[in-house]
Amino acid sequence: MAAGSSRFGHIARIMLLAFTLAWISLALWNCAKPLPPGTHVASQTSRVSESDVDFWNELAPRQAAAAVGELAAIDHAEQLIVLDRSPLDVELAQHLLARKHARPNIKIVLVTDPAHEAFGGTPAQLLAELEQSGIIVSRVRLSRLRDSNPLYSGLWRLLLGWWSDPFDEPQDRVTLATRLRMQNGKADQRQLTVADDGSGGWTAVMAPAGPAAGLTLRGSVARAMIASELKIAAWSTDDDRLPAGPPLEGRGVGAIDVRFLTEGAIAAVLLDDIRAAGNGDEISIAVDDLADRRLIAALLGAAARGVRVQVLLRANRMPNSSVAGELTRGGGRVDVRRLSGAAGSHLKLLLVRHRADSWLNLGSANFTRRNLDDLNLEAGVELRMPARAAPSRAAAAYFARLWAGAEAADFAQASPAEYWRYRWAEATGLSSF
């Protein structure tokens, strides 16, 4: 009996060791595996004129809201429409269907997050209607992305991932497999629409902040957006109807430099812009969540150099309360205020006023590790332009109005325990931000 028990214990230890090694191996591999095509994009710089860029926002009634810019782009397209939208609202879907009916030969590609409707995904019935009309719907295979929550995701991949496929699960009810898969924290959060303008040009609409704010761009930067989106569609679907993207163009002419950025490339540009700011410059940030350690260090460094730094954050205990305390500690080196209500909802904006120039970053990525470390699909654009340019003045005026209406920095001061819980959550991915 003793020998049998010893043998069983030895086998159990070997199995436990093998299981642990498999778990750790999967976790490590999926933190560092090669990125799929179309991700971590920093396009070549395109030069455009002021008339080719519109910065619109909720506080400027003369200008269109997000949907208007997208709907106009869709309604004028003759050859190709590419969208990355999660979720897709009914009005936008109706315009896609109407355009496909009016122009049967037009190619329309929708890239979207396969999230269950109960978790904020597009209703399956709506996607089926689009597919039946001839529109190509590419539900992103998020498992090909690196894992933001490796401790959990490594275990999930080992035990559950091989039978938990969002493409095979029922959409009329939430299953246990659905709930467990959503804990991986993966998402396609790019929010953009690109379409030809019917006369040889291209229009791109970046609407990451929904009705709050966005950009409409005309010019060759749209071609870089299409190229990235079609690559994502290609590894997410086997549909052989995917079109070829338009050829990339040269630099162009104008006073504004534009770059299309995705995933980790967004972080690199944000850091470059903050670190380049010097004494007398201004940095303005409005974002839902700020937690990335590199950005926090860069902002504190900028403030120490004499840069005026203003940060608008949503009120939540983790991470923003802890980060606000860190930024304002020691004499208020950084000025922090709290966004409340619907104003600036889902805004992710950085504006640097550097001497006579202005650098604007607007995109879908929160300033957190999950959003800036090549772990989710994110998109944004960087504009470098004279401070007197219309888009720069519009963005500065919008931020100033948000700032004036924001509450003073009365974030609850986080305790040391809360601060270190935030640090642990940010480092490990065991967080909701």
Image: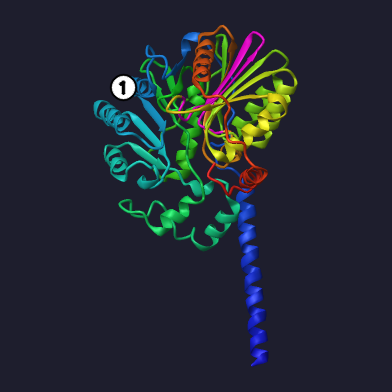
Residue 265 on the magenta segment: no
Quadrant occupied by the C terminus: top right
| Mark 1 Cα-neighbour bin, 10 Å: few <14, some 14–19, many ≥20 | some
Label 1 sits on residue: 75
Give the residue displayed 65% in from the left and 33% down from the top. Answer: 325
> Closer to the camera, 52 or 36?
52
One can see residue 324 in this view: yes
Place residue 265 in its image quadrant. top right
Residue 370 percent location from the top left of the image: 57, 41
Residue 178 percent location from the top left of the image: 41, 54
| Horizontal relation, residue 140 to residue 291: left or right | left
> Closer to the camera, 91 or 162?
91
Q: Which residue lies furthest to the right in this view?
A: 305
Residue 63 percent location from the top left of the image: 39, 14
Q: Which residue lies furthest to the bottom in this view?
A: 1
One can see residue 333 in this view: no
Q: Indicate whether 157 appears above or below 237.
A: below
Residue 192 percent location from the top left of the image: 44, 29
> Closer to the camera, 425 or 148?
425
The magenta segment is: 344-366
Q: Indicate whether 322 appears above or below 283.
A: below
Kindly identify the amino acid type of the residue bearing the numbered disc 1. Asp
Quadrant occupied by the N terminus: bottom right
- Under circle 1, the secondary element is helix
